[in-house]
Amino acid sequence: MDDGCEMRRGDLLLLGTRGSRPVPDASFLRYGGNTLSAALPLESTTLIIDGGTGIVDLGEALARDRFAPGAIDLLFTHFHHDHLCGLLSFRPLYMKRFDVTIHLAPDVIDTGKNALRTLFAAPFRPVEWDNLAAAISFREAPEELRFGGVAVRRHPLRHPGGSYGYRLAAAAGSVVLAWDNEHPPGGVDDGLAGFCRGAGAILYDAQYTPDEYEAHRGWGHGTYEAGARLLHDSGAKRLVLVHHEPARNDDGIDTLLAEARRLEPRIDAGREGMSFPVGT
């Protein structure tokens, strides 16, 4: 795993780490203040998971790079605003040379289409969805998608309104994105543990400390304590905490991480620019 911000083909890049809302404040720079999103640059496309504010800088980079592939494939875990709001300023949507394909599970295809059209609807935006310059299409996603040599599978998570986790796997490694997930009462979700079995890394929702969680049951988010149990039961190599509480600054995340590592030293805290090898 590399903590630089360089886009390298075949590496999943963590673009945003924050949950609920972005936090543009100097005391949040080390771990990052953008809301969740990740990207996997491949030879023929850029695969993006979620449209948090972390994708805005990526969009600027793609727009500047005349050698970047014109194809973009988009997946969403769910359609809460913090996972969509970066799309409003994602420059490739406003450029004719980009071809954007949005892959949606059959049970959420109508919800997803409506959410995106509403996001860009008047009076909130001057450019509405149907007037965006890019060629945009929706596709019903099967249980497994393939982008070159990368296999992408989804798994339902525990979150109000529903959410999906994704496992990306290829020759170089595998990564599971399991943010916006709440552990079941009393333990680990066995289905999720099986989905994560043997993964190189799990990006896991740990918005709350165990004490904070008691006041937020049913909100759809987790703890590092539940993450440590998932890491143990799944046999994955490491766990990376994401969906950071927006009121928790860098020093607060340092403290939370130290507490988590007392349970399991293979836990890290997600930082913008972290990358994870997957392969092409």
Image: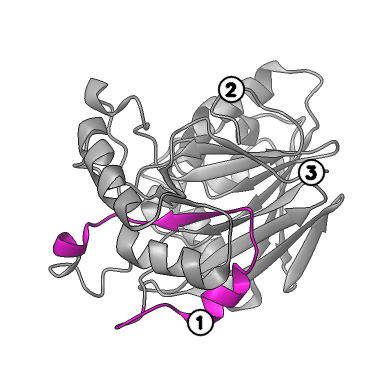
User: The disc labelled 3 sits on which kind of residue?
Assistant: Gly
Q: Is residue 5 left or right of residue 41?
A: left
Alpha-carbon distance for marks 2 and 1?
40 Å
Q: Please indicate whether residue 179 sits to the left or right of residue 91 in the image.
A: left
Which residue is found at the position 25% from the left and 43% from the top? Answer: 246
Question: Where's the C terminus, which quadrant?
Answer: top right
In this picture, which residue range is highlighted in magenta?
Answer: 184-212
In the image, is 78 to the left or to the right of 20? Answer: right
Residue corresponding to mark 3:
279
Q: Which residue is mark 2?
A: 60
Q: Secondary structure at mark 2?
A: helix
Q: Are marks 2 and 1 in contact (CB under 8 Å)?
A: no
Dividing the picture into quadrants, the one containing residue 188 is bottom left
Q: Residues within 10 Å of mark 3 (few under 14, many from 20)?
A: many
Residue in front for this viewpoint, 24 or 215: 215
Classify mark 1: residues with Cα within 10 Å, few (<14), some (14-19) or many (20+): few
What amino acid is labelled 2 in the image?
Glu
